[in-house]
Image (tube, grey):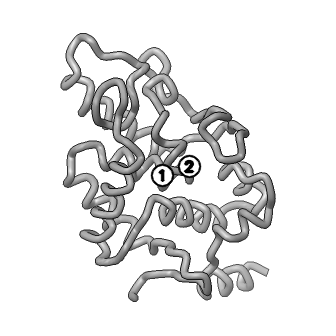
């Protein structure tokens, strides 16, 4: 598999090329799939944490917020966390708002889900899983899950920061949980040694 990074326990991680292919397919989709891909890929949140995100979580009086705060009841660990939002994610939220806001009419509410679907409910977790699976299959020809995007986020973060920071961003209680999510390639190892 060209561009694929896999570990002994067969955890999928996307190469940069695959990431951009999936983003491209999502942008062609035009139904909110791009927002879902960006949210998962650039925060590393779990699919169950993405579902309850509303416009209030990402915007404040028309301005895009700089961090996403997850509520404790959304998480497996029952610990909420504050995640800075990258400029890529903030720009995508602004585009998503521009695209979706006119379609909602005057009854728009910031308490509505960020992701599309019925105004009060948004997409179900199962619908989100299907969207990611379809986009992954179309873009890369292989099985991609929402958790693949989480692993990819963690692996990409490893290139720029330490495990402890990644642990906090992913919301893990234990550092050994975070290590499972990071998959350095041979090239990553070579670059690390070259920096000595």
Tell me the residue at 69%/49% (across/down): 171
Q: Residue at x 56, y 53 (%)?
A: 44
Residue placed under numbered mark 2 in the picture: 45
Image quadrant where one finds the N terminus:
bottom left
Q: Which of the labelled discs sits on residue 184, or is there none? A: none
Distance between the alpha carbons at the discs numbered 2 and 1: 6 Å
- Left-right relation of 183 to 88: right
Q: Position of residue 4 (x, y in %)?
A: 45, 81
Looking at the picture, how far across and down is residue 108, in whole percent?
30, 16
Element class at badge 1: helix
Check disc 2: other Cα within 10 Å, few if <14, some if 14-19, many if 20+.
many
Please name the residue that numbered disc 1 is placed on.
40
The answer to which image quadrant residue 18 occupies is bottom left
Residue depicted at 33% across the width and 58% down the height: 23
Q: Earlier in the sequence, mark 2 or mark 1?
A: 1
| Residue drawn at x 53%, y 29% as measured from the top left | 65
Picture coordinates of residue 113 (x, y %)?
A: 40, 30
- Residue 116, compared with residue 134, is above or below; it is above
Confirm or deny contact between disc 2 and disc 1 (CB under 8 A). yes
Q: Is residue 99 above or below residue 41?
A: above
- 141 versus 130 height, above or below: below
Q: Nearer the viewer, residue 121 or 193?
A: 121
Find residue 5 and report its horizontal and vertical position in percent.
51, 81
């Amino acid at each position: 598999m060209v561009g694929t990074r896999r570990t002994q326990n067969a955890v999928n991680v996307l190469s940069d090329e695959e990431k951009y292919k999936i983003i491209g397919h999502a942008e062609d989709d035009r139904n909110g799939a791009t927002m879902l891909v960006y949210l998962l890929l650039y925060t590393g949140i779990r699919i169950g944490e993405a579902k309850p995100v509303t416009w209030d979580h990402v915007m404040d009086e028309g301005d895009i917020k700089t961090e996403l705060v997850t509520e404790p009841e959304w998480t497996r660990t029952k610990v909420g966390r504050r995640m800075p939002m990258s400029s890529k994610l903030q720009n995508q939220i602004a585009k998503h708002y521009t695209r979706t806001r006119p379609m909602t009419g005057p009854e728009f509410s910031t308490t509505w889900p960020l992701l599309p679907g019925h105004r009060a409910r948004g997409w179900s977790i199962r619908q989100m899983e299907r969207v990611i699976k379809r986009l992954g299959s179309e873009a890369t020809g292989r099985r991609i899950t929402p958790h693949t995007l989480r692993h990819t986020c963690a692996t990409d973060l490893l290139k720029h920061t330490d495990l402890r920071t990644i642990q906090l961003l992913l919301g893990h209680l234990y550092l050994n949980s975070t290590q499972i999510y990071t998959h350095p390639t041979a090239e990553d190892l070579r670059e690390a040694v070259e920096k000595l």
